[in-house]
Image (tube, helix red, strand yellow):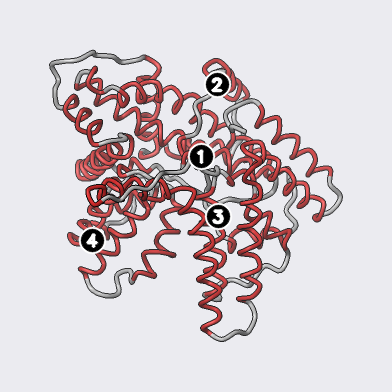
């Protein structure tokens, strides 16, 4: 069920009505759980069993970890959770990738092994990380085990964020179930406006930019340097509008049901360093990698060289998490190198740009240089082969050949994003908070809905992060 299609708003508001009519907290939980299973089955019912197995595995291991056990048994239970979750993820997502890579490396010695026709279960990367964080937090005694299978199942399968995040931790979500969440009038307006914001980002920005980005990256050799440059900008805008739009829709949907999900984006293209970028982009994944991978590897506790290695390993695995392909590994390595370089030069200790401040050339230079480095990374992320990557850069650096193509809707969407980011940096930033804190004018809401209806396609572009 695509968030950007009509079926989802109809489904969501039907669930909101049912939850609001429920007479008890228990009824509300069962309604949301049933809706979550239906939502997932709508995508592919064949993998409901896998989702249930992951839920039961970590719930039962969590209960066992809550007992008084020897340290060796507790480590064994944690290893079982890691093996079960990561093993399942590795099989479905990386089996063919590793087999094909091994064949390419060792075929001269007669190594040959066929690949399998494996369908990637939607959302597996996200709910695997969620359940793993629960088990690890219980193992570390940061969290009391959840004794209710109903509550834990609702945490794992909660439909607004099940497919593509945000990655929610049990320590954030389970306490909300204890306070008997319900539909509240005070949450209806913020939830609806967050939904509207997400639909605007997806339909009016990301889908319009996708037309240009898809064409340019598919056949870069056909286009001129300026068109390629605009196409790279279009992809940067597309992936931001697409994923942050999904996060807004997920957060808004949860609010309508009485839940709060963590923020996932904070104007990442205004970052003043790559370190700052990762404080703003896919924030729930960034903190997950920090707390459950970078710090366990040693973090910055064992000297500078070890710190740089830990940063690179973390980002390599973060890149591989996005997809079973070498371009994602290269993208992760690129960001790992940049993070290590910033740590070595002290750039990573610069304060985050959180408040409006007078625009100076130093701030502008930091933002511009960071954005260029991010764009280079997006060319690695989006191209599917070395040949395509080289063809893209060959066309990008050649400004005298190829087709010049600038679709008006893509240029309009990029202009809108640029203006919105400029406003966020200025003293007019409070205006951008109006959708959450104050009623929007009916004409503005009507204009946004009319624009969405006008530009929405019969078959909306799938969300970029669904493939992960």
Q: Mark 4 vs mark 2: give the one in front.
A: 2
Where residue 375 sits, quadrant-wise, is top left
Q: Residues within 10 Å of mark 2 (few under 14, many from 20)?
A: few
Determine which of the numbered discs, if any, sits on residue 343 in the image: 4
Check the image and report above or below for 125 versus 252: below
C-alpha separation, residue under disc 4 versus residue under disc 2: 45 Å
Determine which of the numbered discs, if any, sits on residue 433 in the image: 1
Residue under label 3: 168
Q: Mark 4 vs mark 1: give the one in front.
A: 4
Q: Earlier in the sequence, mark 1 or mark 3?
A: 3
Give x and y (percent) for residue 149: 72, 62
Dot 2 lies on which element? loop
Asked whether the beta carbons under mark 3 and mark 4 sit within 8 Å of each other, the answer is: no
Dot 4 lies on which element? helix
Give x and y (percent) for residue 85: 53, 59
Residue under label 2: 459
Q: Earlier in the sequence, mark 4 or mark 1?
A: 4
Give x and y (percent) for residue 66: 63, 77
Where residue 59 sits, quadrant-wise, is bottom right
């Amino acid at each position: 069920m695509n968030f950007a299609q009509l079926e989802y708003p109809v489904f969501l508001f039907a669930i909101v009505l049912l939850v609001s009519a429920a007479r008890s907290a228990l009824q509300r939980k069962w309604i949301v759980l049933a809706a979550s299973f239906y939502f997932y089955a709508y995508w592919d019912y064949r993998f409901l069993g896998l989702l249930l197995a992951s839920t039961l595995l970590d719930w039962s291991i969590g209960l066992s970890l809550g007992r008084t056990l020897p340290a060796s048994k507790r480590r064994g239970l944690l290893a079982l959770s890691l093996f079960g979750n990561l093993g399942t993820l590795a099989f479905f997502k990386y089996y063919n990738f590793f087999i094909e890579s091994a064949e390419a490396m060792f075929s001269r010695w007669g190594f040959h092994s066929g690949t399998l026709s494996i369908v990637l279960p939607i959302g597996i990367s996200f709910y695997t990380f969620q359940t793993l964080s629960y088990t690890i937090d219980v193992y570390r005694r940061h969290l009391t085990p959840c004794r209710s299978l109903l509550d834990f199942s609702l945490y794992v399968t909660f439909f607004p964020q099940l497919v593509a995040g945000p990655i929610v931790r049990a320590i954030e979500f389970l306490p909300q179930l204890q306070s008997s969440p319900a539909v509240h009038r005070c949450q209806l307006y913020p939830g609806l406006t967050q939904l509207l914001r997400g639909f605007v980002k997806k339909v009016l920005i990301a889908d319009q930019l996708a037309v240009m980005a898809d064409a340019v990256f598919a056949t870069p050799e056909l286009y001129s340097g300026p068109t390629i440059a605009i196409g790279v900008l279009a992809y940067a805008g597309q992936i931001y509008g697409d994923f942050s739009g999904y996060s807004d829709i997920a957060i808004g949907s949860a609010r309508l049901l009485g839940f709060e999900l963590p923020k996932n984006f904070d104007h990442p293209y205004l970052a003043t360093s790559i370190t700052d970028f990762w404080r703003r982009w896919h924030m729930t994944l960034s903190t997950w990698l920090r707390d459950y991978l970078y710090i366990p590897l040693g973090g910055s506790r064992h000297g500078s060289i070890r710190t740089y290695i830990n940063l690179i390993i973390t980002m390599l695995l973060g890149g591989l998490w996005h997809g079973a392909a070498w371009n994602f590994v290269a993208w992760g390595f690129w960001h790992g190198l940049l993070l290590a370089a910033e740590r070595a030069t002290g750039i990573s200790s610069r304060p985050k740009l959180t408040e409006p401040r007078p625009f100076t050339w130093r701030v502008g230079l930091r933002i511009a240089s960071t954005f260029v480095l991010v764009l280079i990374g997006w060319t690695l992320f989006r191209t599917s082969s070395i040949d395509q990557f080289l063809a893209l850069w060959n066309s990008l650096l050649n400004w005298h050949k190829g087709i010049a193509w600038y679709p008006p809707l893509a240029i309009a969407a990029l202009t809108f994003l640029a203006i919105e980011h400029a406003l966020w940096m200025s003293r007019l930033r409070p205006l951008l908070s109006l959708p959450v804190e104050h009623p929007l004018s009916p004409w503005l809401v009507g204009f946004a809905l009319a624009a969405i209806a006008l530009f929405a396609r019969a078959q909306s572009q799938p969300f970029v992060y669904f493939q992960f």
